[in-house]
Image (cartoon, rainbow, N blue to C red):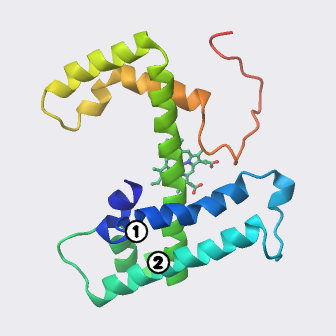
């Protein structure tokens, strides 16, 4: 979905391959801080992440070249916007590639794991599951539009509680500047 929404069908066709190429970077980032220290050694998680990043760069480069060779007036996604930028907004190819890889990395595992946790937690509690179903039946029965999502009030609360219990993106931690207490305790 991330690939499709941000970068259209061209990269989405290679979603499975791109997903597999993101895995070594994830494995590398999920190690302890000490093991993440930069080094040039081969046959390590870092060297695998380096190699798959180069592979990803080649895929993004090929997509940029394809679009430059045959610009499409029909569609315009984020990659088209980055490529079309002129003047002070213009990015180098390396910067565009970094943006694309960052957005895929930031948008792919966060949403996947958050949705998986939300489904698991809700399905584990019959009351929660039933309230979600009732609300969905009511709200989604009508015409869908910009007001649909805000009206899914209970689903919104389930998502927020899921993100509180199972926050995605935990490898850039913050330290609270003052003590906080959970509303439940
Ligand atoms: C459930 C979904 C998501 C969660 C829980 C989540 C969580 C986070 C967290 C915790 C950070 C780090 C913030 C910081 O430490 O400064 C972050 C940053 C970021 N996220 Fe997400 N994210 C989600 C979805 C997405 C999606 C779908 C995209 C893009 C399509 C995205 C793009 C980014 C980017 C670009 C940054 C870096 C922002 C910056 O500091 O420049 N995220 N996200």
- Check disc 2: other Cα within 10 Å, few if <14, some if 14-19, many if 20+: some
Image check: 39 left or right of 84? right
Residue at image x 51%, y 23%?
121
Q: Quadrant of residue 122?
A: top left
Name the image quarter holding the C terminus.
top right
Give the left or right position of residue 102, taking residue 63 as reference: right
In the picture of the structure, the residue carrying the numbered disc 2 is 59
Local secondary structure at mark 1: loop
Pointer 2 or 1: first along the chain? 1
Locate residue 137, reporting x and y percent.
22, 21
Identify the residue position indicated by label 1 in the image: 14
Residues 31 and 105: in front is 31
In the rendered image, residue 82, in percent from the top left (x then y), is placed at 40, 73
Q: In the picture shown, does residue 144 fall above or below 39?
A: above
Q: Position of residue 141 (x, y in %)?
A: 15, 25
Residue at 26% from the left image edge and 86% from the top image edge: 70
């Amino acid at each position: 979905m991330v690939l499709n929404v941000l970068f259209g069908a061209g990269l989405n066709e290679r979603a499975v391959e791109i997903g597999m190429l993101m895995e070594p970077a994830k494995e590398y980032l999920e190690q302890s801080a000490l093991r993440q220290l930069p080094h040039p050694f081969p046959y390590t998680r870092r060297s695998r992440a380096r190699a798959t990043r180069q592979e990803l760069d080649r895929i993004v480069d090929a997509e940029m070249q394809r679009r430059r060779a045959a610009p499409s007036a029909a569609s315009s996604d984020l990659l088209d916007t980055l490529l079309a930028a002129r003047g002070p907004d213009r990015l180098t190819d390396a910067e565009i590639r970094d943006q694309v890889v960052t957005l895929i990395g930031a948008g792919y595992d966060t949403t996947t794991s958050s949705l998986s946790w939300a489904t698991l937690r809700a399905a584990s509690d019959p009351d929660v599951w039933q309230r979600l179903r009732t609300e969905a039946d009511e709200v989604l029965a009508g015409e869908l539009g910009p007001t649909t999502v805000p009206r899914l009030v209970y689903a919104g609360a389930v998502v927020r509680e899921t993100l509180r219990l199972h926050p995605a993106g935990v490898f850039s931690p913050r330290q609270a500047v003052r003590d906080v207490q959970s509303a439940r305790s």
